[in-house]
Image: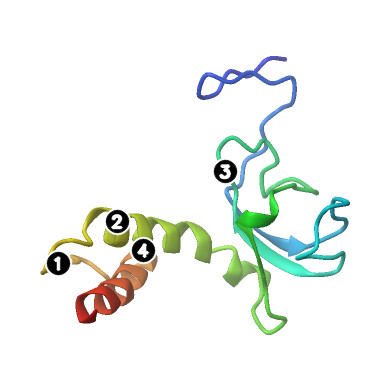
């Protein structure tokens, strides 16, 4: 089955799940930052067919972050999308502005956006 997505085609079926957290089962031969048994979390690229709802998922080393033992996988999986969305909005789009209004900042994205805005407006 060919699945066209963003102009790309693949024989492999796309698995849902952009936010991923789990334990590394194996790493590639050139990977030095991670090893089997490490707990990690990441935001999957839309071009990566291996989603977080699969039994196994693959990603690149630059997208994964080590996860401390005291943080549950369910909590870690919520971080990447909300944090990255806030980063894109505040840092990449609004950064040159002297005043930033974050309306309804009580949600996940808003919480991150408020913290990022406080950092850049103090700088």
Secondary element under disc 2, as helix, strand or loop, is: helix
Looking at marks 3 and 2 on the same chain, the residue that comes earlier in the sequence is marked by 3
Q: Earlier in the sequence, mark 1 or mark 4?
A: 1
Residue at the image point whose x is 80% and y is 49% from the top: 55
Tag 2–tag 1 contact (CB < 8 Å): no
To which residue does mark 1 refer? 101
The local secondary structure at tag 1 comes to loop
- Asked which secondary structure carries label 4, the reply is helix
Q: Residue furthest left?
A: 99
Camera-side mark, 3 or 4: 3
Asked if residue 14 is positioned above or below residue 7 in the image, the reply reads below
Q: Residue 110 in the image: x percent, y percent? A: 31, 67
Q: Are marks 2 and 4 in contact (CB under 8 Å)?
A: yes
Quadrant of the rendering where the N terminus is positioned = top right
State how far apart marks 2 and 4 are (Cα). 10 Å
Q: Which residue is mark 2?
A: 89
Disc nearer the start of the sequence (2/1): 2
Q: Quadrant of residue 26?
A: bottom right
98 sits to left or right of 50? left
Q: Are marks 3 and 4 in contact (CB under 8 Å)?
A: no
- For marks 3 and 4 on the same chain, the one whose residue lies earlier in the sequence: 3
Q: Position of residue 82 (x, y in %)?
A: 43, 61
- Residue 45: mark in rendering: 3
In 3D space, how far apart are the residues under numbered discs 1 and 4 (Cα atoms)? Answer: 13 Å
| Mark carried by residue 109 | 4
The C terminus is located in which quarter?
bottom left
Mark 3 vs mark 4, CA separation in Å: 19 Å
């Amino acid at each position: 089955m060919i699945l066209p997505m963003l102009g790309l085609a693949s024989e492999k079926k796309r698995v849902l799940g952009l936010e991923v957290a789990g334990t590394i089962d194996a790493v590639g031969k050139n990977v030095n930052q991670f090893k089997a048994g490490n707990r990690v979390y990441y935001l999957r690229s839309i071009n990566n067919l291996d989603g977080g709802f699969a039994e196994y998922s693959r990603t690149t080393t630059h997208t994964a972050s080590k996860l401390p033992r005291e943080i549950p996988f369910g909590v870690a999986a919520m971080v990447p999308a909300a944090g990255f969305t806030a980063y894109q909005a505040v840092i990449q789009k609004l950064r040159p502005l002297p005043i930033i209004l974050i309306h309804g900042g009580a949600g996940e994205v808003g919480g991150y956006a408020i913290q990022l805005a406080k950092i850049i407006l103090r700088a």
